[in-house]
Amino acid sequence: MRLDDSRTPAVEADPGRRFGSSRGDRHRLILDRYRLERRLGAGGFGVVWLAFDEKLEREVAVKVVEREGDGPVPERTVREARVAARLNHPGIVALYELGEDEDAVYLVSELVHGRTLGELAHAGALSDRDVARIGAALCDALAHAHDRKVIHRDVKPQNVIVAADPAVGAGFAKLADFGVAYLGAADPLTRTGDVVGTLAYMAPEQAEGARVTAAADVYALALTLYEAWTGSNPVRGPSPAATARRLGRRMPSMAAYRPDLPRDLCAWIDAALDPVPERRPKLSTLREALREAAPELADSGGLREPETLQRLGIPRTTDERTRVLEDVLSGGRSRDLLTRAGAGLSAGGLALAGLETLGPHPRFSPAAAAAAVAIVVALLPRLGWLLGAAGFVAWLGWELRDGTALVVGAALVAAPVLAPRVRRGWSVPALAPLLGAAGLGPFYPAIAGFASTALRRAGLAAAGYVWLCCAELLTSDRLLFGPPVDAAARAAWARSLPGAASDALLPLASSPVLVGAAVWAAAAAVLPLVVRGRSLALDIAGAVVWGALLTGAHRAVAELAGSHIHGTDARGAAAGAALGALAAVAARAWGLWRRAGEPAQFP
């Protein structure tokens, strides 16, 4: 039985005789072709050397496993070689040869220049996006192994090598050490009751000695990613006994440690750490969750930055063209291009609508100006949007010489102020007045609820509410509660900026109706918490409660506003909330169906 608490013990060598302890081993030729050059490390099952293959003239890694007297080849070494014969994947360290002589057994494998995931995490060299990319690559590698009836059983940070210079997207992260892998039902080397692997990353059923399935690797991978993102392994205790007592307990949600990470991502990691193996998601589902979350994750301070590589002493030879191709192959760059294009098109459309409706017909081509805004925003989302908004407000002020520019500017500034991190979605609040015109204003919090974090959801929803209120001032129409009763119509302040401030914006700012911004912000922030995609029945129940509370909150705001509004309720409160709840459930169901490859897969 092999059972350790995450660290492989060093080999205790007898100086002068055993491999890895004597300087005389250096430059030694083994198997008539591999020249040992530099010792890379040691573990409980051998010493690893960097060696040079004199036949093929390439560097390789050689694990030296010493014989115990005249005994047979160690069981673990044979297992690792048998597994390697089944696997051929860029995300798995390739084994080239198994050889032996009278002194030792040799496993000759691919040499991967890089660092282990554990080393990089300890050095603080991984961005959140790096961890997601590593996780997706490991999902691919493990899926390849599982297709060939191989269960790794020892996935942990020390067995994941992150390549310093991946070959055009292939092998960004490589899984190593299949020495305790399970080779399917016919494996004679593992019996029920055997416990092999690393205790701090072991699935509960594996620790109990039961036959393991692919779900055990899903658990270990999720725990490895959990640790990389949070900085701690909740299973590991101060001693092996303490660690063993924690096995099988439900862990704290990853969102409790990292509330800034996308809620969906945290939910899938939590699901993969379920003590019951049948309730864990498939590798394909986890992989899609990681790939979808990656573009939303922070990328600063990670492996993409030369400063990080220089600090770790990792050479990087991949040029920019290779990195672009790597991004395309991994799906990251294509998603980035799509989101940029979406941001540009929405900003351009908003500019065109404003030029055509809010002022006199411009002396330039509105279509050409809108296209320019779209291109600049697509290239520089934050700066381009701010420049476009400032230019539009300046044009309004110059052309109209009235307070319209002030009210429009108040609406435009709400997005970057209230939702600064949603820079590619600053045009989304324009949907709120459009929905209000259709009598479905309360549907908008459900749209804002798709943002990745609670703060982004709340900010985007509050900005949409401000846009809707400003649209009511400009049109004097009732889109939700209607403009405040003491706000003058646009014609009254059309001649004066101070008039717009005193007769439009001040009555709005002092009206209790602005409490609705907090209602929308709260509704958007909590929506992913009540419609989580874990159970269709629970999602429907949560959506019903969410819709009912949102409808009731609008009625409460109307009662609070009282004489400050013309009506007695919010326009479309019940219909908008109901459709928003329905859309949230439908979106979750669709996402889960697409990830799992079949309908009704709710882990």
Image (spheres, rainbow, N blue to C red):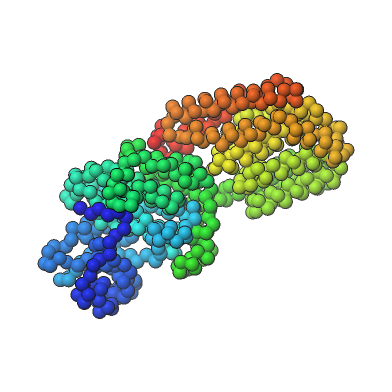
Is 536 situated left or right of 417 in this image?
A: left
Is 227 situated left or right of 211 in this image?
A: right
Q: Quadrant of the C terminus?
A: top left
Question: Residue lying farthest left?
Answer: 70
**Residue depicted at x 23% and y 54%:** 2
Residue 570, quarter of picture = top right
Q: Position of residue 264 (x, y in %)?
A: 48, 41
**Residue depicted at x 23% and y 72%:** 19
Q: Position of residue 203 (x, y in %)?
A: 31, 45
Q: Is residue 33 above or below residue 563?
A: below
Question: Residue lying farthest top?
Answer: 568
Residue nearer the viewer, 297 or 98: 297
Q: Is residue 5 above or below residue 207?
A: below
> Count of labels shown?
0
**Residue depicted at x 72% and y 22%:** 562
**Residue depicted at x 73% and y 47%:** 389
Q: Position of residue 502 (x, y in %)?
A: 83, 36
**Any part of residue 93 in sight:** yes
Q: Position of residue 341 (x, y in %)?
A: 61, 48
**Any part of residue 186 in sight:** no
